[in-house]
């Protein structure tokens, strides 16, 4: 029930806003308002689908809350039943993402046996969680807080009339993405499809564009005025295989507090 990614990239919550005019400031403000209402807890699975169709499913929980001046997202990924713990392919991992209104972001990660959580360096923000196509930074929607925002020509995605928002990071924004395009349903102001373009190999402002990652949102539903998706599919254009983020159940108004995101929660493993 969170947008994975409005965090992102994680599932995201959204409220019905009515049709939005073709104005970047209005559309972005609506998305920021959505993020600033975040307060949910969900359980589900990350699923890695190989090119040949084999599936590996990782149980996970996600909880997120907007505190005054900061979004916190705590993600706990557990290994498949009976899986051997191999780097990024089965070992449990917990990570806490923090995002401020000015776009400043941090990610801390903990594994079983760690004395304390450690900051994840920026070069690893693009790592696939549990070997899936969902990167660590996909679990919060920082693109709505980037400095570059523009609304492109309105279009349809399937039967849905959409605003297409193009978000580009500024020099101070920490990300591996060069741009993010979001197809937002104009009636409910919720993403139905997102394209994230990875920066070129050198990572600089003039590095050009790299791989294209595609995210499709399924099972849109409304609960108490809050819109959510129960599944997000990630694909890399031109590559076989895919990944799924599936939400089995959740609480859209979880009334979370600071203690739910404390160091002991991040480092607590079954």
Image (cartoon, rainbow, N blue to C red):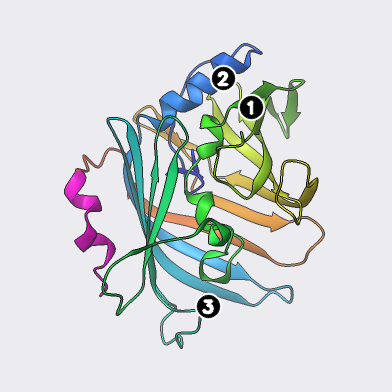
- Magenta range is 258-270
Q: x, y percentage for residue 1?
A: 42, 44
In the picture shown, does residue 237 fall above or below 160?
Answer: below
Q: x, y percentage for residue 53?
A: 69, 74
Q: x, y percentage for residue 137?
A: 52, 51
Identify residue for label 2.
Answer: 27
Nearer to us: label 2 or label 1: 1
Instruction: Say whether residue 105 is left or right of residue 224.
Output: right
* Distance between the alpha carbons at the discs numbered 2 and 1: 13 Å
Query: Mark 3, residues whose alpha carbon is within 10 Å: few (<14), some, or many (≥20)?
Result: some
Point 41% across, 68% down: residue:
59
Element type at marker 1? Answer: strand
Identify residue for label 1.
Answer: 148
Identify residue for label 3.
Answer: 89
Instruction: Say whether residue 110 is left or right of residue 20.
Output: left
Q: Is residue 19 visible?
A: no
Mark 2 and mark 1 lie on one chain; the one further toward the N terminus is 2
Instruction: Say whether residue 78 is left or right of residue 158.
Output: left
Q: Which mark is residue 44?
A: none
Element type at marker 2? Answer: helix
């Amino acid at each position: 029930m969170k947008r994975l990614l409005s965090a992102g990239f994680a599932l995201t919550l959204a409220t019905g806003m009515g049709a939005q005019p073709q104005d970047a400031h209005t559309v972005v403000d609506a998305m920021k308002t959505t993020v600033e209402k975040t307060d949910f807890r969900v359980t589900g699975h990350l699923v890695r689908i190989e090119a040949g169709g084999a599936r590996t499913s990782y149980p996970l929980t996600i909880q997120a809350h907007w505190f005054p001046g900061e979004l916190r997202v705590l993600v706990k990924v557990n290994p498949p039943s009976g899986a051997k713990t191999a780097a990024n392919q089965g070992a449990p991992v917990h990570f806490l993402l923090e995002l401020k209104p000015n776009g400043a972001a941090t990610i801390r990660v903990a594994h079983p046996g760690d004395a304390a959580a450690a900051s994840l360096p920026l070069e690893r923000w693009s790592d696939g969680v549990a070997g899936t196509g969902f990167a660590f930074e996909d679990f919060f929607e920082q693109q709505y807080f980037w400095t570059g925002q523009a609304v492109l020509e309105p279009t349809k995605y399937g039967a849905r009339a959409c605003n297409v928002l193009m978000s580009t990071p500024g020099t101070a924004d920490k990300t591996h993405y060069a741009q993010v395009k979001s197809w937002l349903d104009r009636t409910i102001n919720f993403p139905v499809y997102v394209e994230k373009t990875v920066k070129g190999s050198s990572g600089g402002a003039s590095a050009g564009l790299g791989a294209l990652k595609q995210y499709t949102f399924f099972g849109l539903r409304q609960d108490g005025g809050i819109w959510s998706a129960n599944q997000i599919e990630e694909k890399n254009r031109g590559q076989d295989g895919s990944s799924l983020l599936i939400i089995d159940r959740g609480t859209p108004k979880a009334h979370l507090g600071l203690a739910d995101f404390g160091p002991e929660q991040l480092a607590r493993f079954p």
